[in-house]
């Protein structure tokens, strides 16, 4: 998985309790008669939601085959033949497993020796369903932060209904029980890090004035075991106008360090080392990311960096020693330098080598780099191609040289028609050991996938993938779903979807995935080309792909649908309003749609580096023309959309989808709307809810796009 920019910002979950805004009735606004729908748990708003949900269920539940599709999708999600992905901690591989008997999941562990077996023996550490039943809560797993590789102490994060906000409780993995009187935090979007066995660094909602305007923790405190949280001592502060304050603790023996950061916005930060109770600022480009690795320092560049007589290109990965860098030296070696078609995806580490994942024309490749005779030398890792490839080191740095997996790594591969595989490799050779493979959930014989290119409005070549069902031809009458995202430097690489295969490909549907600007397929420049004043280029690219599909007779406007979620929901909402004649279906999931107020709703203020500040007239001037909520008009023939959101989404406010639907209904447009009460930003809290929502979406698509 590509590491998100500013990992600690995205790991810092919004520190406002979901209930903070739940019942507050927003102040009426003369330009927004539907602002009352922003009251997440307001009686009037929820009554409206229940009414719309009922309309949608009547329209879609009766679709022929709906129940059978939902059952098949759930069986795929619950399949015991899925690959149990894991996190390594010392001698154990930890996994969260959800199936029909355990819808909320088992947090469990096994050894690598057991994992190699076809049917490993797993040891249950925590049963989420049993815990929720005992405590009368709808707990959803949100992760664990453990002290050390073989220590028992872990901080468990539990979410109510799948919201980003979590309760944090200390847990003993050996006793399989919560620690009585141990560390515990109430529901908030908190960040917690072990400093020592009895000491944490905590960012959370400490009360008035402790959050940024984006709603994230502004303050980090050192919290001792047994000490009331209110008495914890502040060790780091960000500004109120920042996105967040964050911390990172490196407990590698001999290289222990604490790093603090101020996230100035979503892409820029300032960094300090903390030692002997003092903060040492680290000079760096504001939008560069630093990664400490024992005595080495790796630097990811998002902009060109001129150092002396050398300019390092944006998207490069540089390496130097920590000692030299802190002393002011700026001599680097590049482990990766981008080209027009190759971009850094991410990297991970063994004890002695750097594993680099990269995009090569939106397909995955990997390299490993080792220090030899004072210089870093790289070589390719032999792996399948072309598809989505991820190589991740298994080394636990706290084990040091004694780690038996110090040079081991996993290789995962998939593409649209190839089920996922997980293999084990070692930097000492090129041989891969197949650990697990996912079964085929649909018959792909006769299907094919290809990459094509469209030309956008400004002449830019935009790649896209087409996945063809069996016997499909370019005859202009194929039901086609065009999917996109185009934001926050997130790439859309090929993926294998049993649900898509069973409910779409096998029924004759074509899938198209557009790699538009704003994403990360070709590095920071591809992303920055469609941010702020240039955001419209994302929509131009998406429109260009749609037009190319029609021109190349893949499909026609009556059988072309579009889908996207979150920023992708904004994408399909904007394109629906701008070019309604191109499409006949729109699946708009957990979307941003009211770009006049997005920065005032939940985590929205943290995204102004992507979109701009609508309170500034000059910036609203570029946002307003594409904001769907402000541009939908009566009397225009739009494709009847399906809006999907979640009441428990405390990242993108459900008010976006609610208000857009209400405005369109008032204007006389037809639409469907469905809001799941649980699920958070992912839309669903367990496999039953996921299968149900997917079945609703497929039923809608076939109603709108089937050949008649």
Image: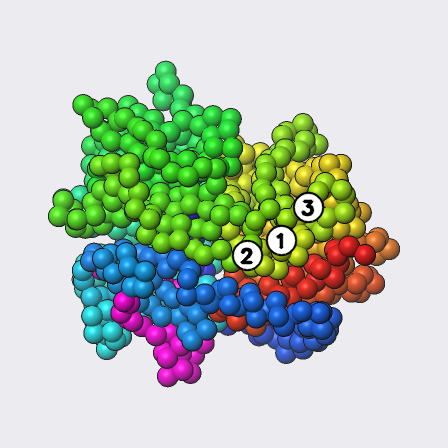
Q: Where does the image place residue 252, in percent across and percent down from the top left?
A: 19, 47
**Badge 3 or badge 1: first in the primary sequence:** 3
Whether pointer 3 and pointer 1 mark residues with C-beta atoms closer than 8 Å, the reply is: no
Which segment did they paint magenta?
A: 121-149
Q: Secondary structure at mark 2?
A: loop
The residue sitting at 65% across, 62% down in the picture is 697
Q: Secondary structure at mark 3?
A: loop
**Badge 2 or badge 1: first in the primary sequence:** 2
For mark 3, what is the residue? 472
In this view, 448 is above or below 125? above
Looking at the image, residue 471 sits to the left or right of residue 149; the answer is: right
Could you tell me if residue 615 is visible in this image? no
For mark 2, what is the residue? 442
Q: Where does the image place residue 136, in percent across and percent down from the top left?
A: 42, 83
In this view, 19 is above or below 195? below
How many angstroms separate mark 2 from mark 1 (CA)?
A: 9 Å
Residue sticking out furthest to the right:
635
How many angstroms separate mark 3 from mark 2 (CA)?
A: 16 Å
Whether pointer 2 and pointer 1 mark residues with C-beta atoms closer than 8 Å, the reply is: yes
Q: Where does the image place residue 289, in percent across and percent down from the top left?
A: 37, 39
Confirm whether the magenta stretch covers residue 209.
Answer: no
Looking at the image, residue 178 sits to the left or right of residue 142; the answer is: left
Give the number of the disc on residue 505: 1
The residue sitting at 68% across, 72% down in the picture is 61
How is the protein colored in the picture? rainbow
Whether pointer 3 and pointer 2 mark residues with C-beta atoms closer than 8 Å, the reply is: no
Q: Where does the image place residue 525, in percent across and percent down from the top left?
A: 52, 32
Q: Secondary structure at mark 1?
A: helix
The residue sitting at 65% across, 61% down in the picture is 698
Which quarter of the figure is the C terminus placed in?
bottom right
Residues packed near mark 1 inside 10 Å, few (<14), some (14 to 19) or many (20 plus): many
């Amino acid at each position: 998985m590509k590491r998100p920019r500013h990992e600690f910002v995205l790991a810092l979950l919004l520190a406002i309790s979901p209930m903070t805004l739940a019942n507050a009735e927003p102040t009426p606004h003369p330009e927004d008669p539907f602002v009352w729908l922003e009251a997440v748990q307001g009686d009037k708003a929820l009554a409206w939601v229940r009414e719309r949900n009922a309309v949608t269920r009547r329209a879609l539940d009766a679709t022929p085959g709906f129940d059978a599709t939902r059952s098949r999708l759930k069986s795929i999600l619950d399949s015991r033949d899925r690959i149990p992905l894991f996190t390594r901690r010392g001698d154990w591989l930890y996994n969260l497993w959800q199936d029909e008997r355990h819808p909320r999941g088992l947090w469990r562990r096994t050894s690598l020796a057991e994992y190699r077996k076809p049917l490993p023996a797993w040891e249950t550490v925590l049963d989420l369903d049993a815990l929720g039943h005992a405590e009368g809560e709808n707990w959803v797993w949100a992760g664990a932060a453990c002290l050390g590789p073989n220590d028992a102490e872990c901080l468990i994060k539990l979410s109510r209904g799948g919201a980003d906000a979590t309760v944090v409780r200390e847990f003993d993995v050996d006793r399989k029980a919560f620690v009585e009187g141990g560390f515990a935090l109430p529901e908030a979007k908190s960040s917690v890090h072990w400093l020592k066995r009895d000491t944490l660094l905590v960012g959370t909602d400490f009360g008035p004035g402790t959050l940024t305007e984006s709603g994230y923790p502004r303050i980090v405190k050192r919290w001792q075991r047994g000490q009331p949280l209110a008495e914890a001592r502040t060790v780091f502060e960000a500004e109120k106008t920042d996105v967040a304050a964050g911390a990172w603790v490196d407990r590698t023996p001999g290289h222990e360090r604490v790093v603090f950061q101020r996230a100035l916005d979503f892409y820029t930060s300032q960094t300090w080392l903390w030692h002997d109770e003092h903060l040492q600022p680290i000079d760096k480009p504001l939008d560069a990311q630093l990664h400490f690795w024992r005595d080495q320092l790796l630097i990811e560049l998002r902009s060109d960096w001129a150092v002396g007589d050398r300019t390092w290109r944006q998207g490069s990965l540089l390496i130097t020693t920590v000692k030299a860098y802190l002393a002011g030296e700026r001599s680097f070696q590049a482990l990766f330098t981008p080209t027009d078609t190759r971009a850094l995806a991410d990297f991970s580490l063994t004890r002695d080598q750097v594993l680099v994942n990269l995009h090569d024309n939106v397909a995955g490749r990997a390299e490993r780099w080792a220090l030899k005779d004072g210089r870093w030398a790289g070589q390719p890792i032999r792996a399948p191609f072309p598809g989505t490839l991820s190589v991740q080191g298994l080394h636990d740095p706290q084990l040091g040289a004694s780690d038996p997996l110090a040079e081991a790594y996993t290789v995962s591969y998939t593409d649209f028609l190839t089920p996922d595989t997980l293999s084990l490799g070692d930097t000492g050779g090129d041989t891969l050991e197949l650990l697990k493979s996912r079964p085929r959930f649909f018959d792909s014989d006769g299907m094919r996938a290809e990459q094509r290119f469209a030309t956008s409005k400004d002449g830019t070549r935009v790649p896209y993938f087409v996945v063809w069902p069996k016997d499909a031809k370019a005859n202009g009458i194929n039901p086609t779903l065009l999917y996109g995202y185009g934001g926050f430097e997130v790439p859309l690489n090929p993926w294998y979807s049993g649900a898509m295969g069973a409910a779409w490909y096998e029924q004759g549907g074509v899938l198209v995935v557009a790699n538009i600007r704003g994403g990360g397929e070709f590095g920071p420049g591809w992303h920055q080309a469609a941010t702020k004043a240039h955001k419209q280029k994302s929509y131009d690219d998406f429109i260009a792909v749609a037009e190319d599909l029609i021109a190349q007779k893949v499909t026609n406007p009556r059988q072309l649908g579009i889908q996207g979620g979150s920023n992708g929901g904004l994408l399909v909402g904007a394109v629906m309003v701008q070019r309604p004649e191109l499409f006949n279906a729109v699946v708009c999931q957990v979307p941003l749609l009211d770009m006049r107020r997005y920065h005032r709703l939940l985590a929205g203020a943290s995204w102004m580096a992507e979109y701009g500040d609508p309170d500034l007239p000059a910036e609203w001037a570029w946002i307003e023309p594409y904001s769907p909520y402000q541009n939908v008009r009566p009397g225009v023939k739009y494709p009847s959309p399906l809006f999907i959101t979640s009441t428990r989404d405390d990242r993108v406010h459900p008010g976006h989808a609610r208000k857009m639907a209400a405005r369109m209904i008032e204007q006389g447009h037809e639409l469907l709307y469905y809001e799941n009460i649980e699920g958070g930003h992912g839309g669903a809290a367990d496999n039953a809810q996921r299968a149900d929502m997917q079945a609703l979406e497929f039923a809608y698509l076939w109603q709108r796009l089937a050949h008649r």
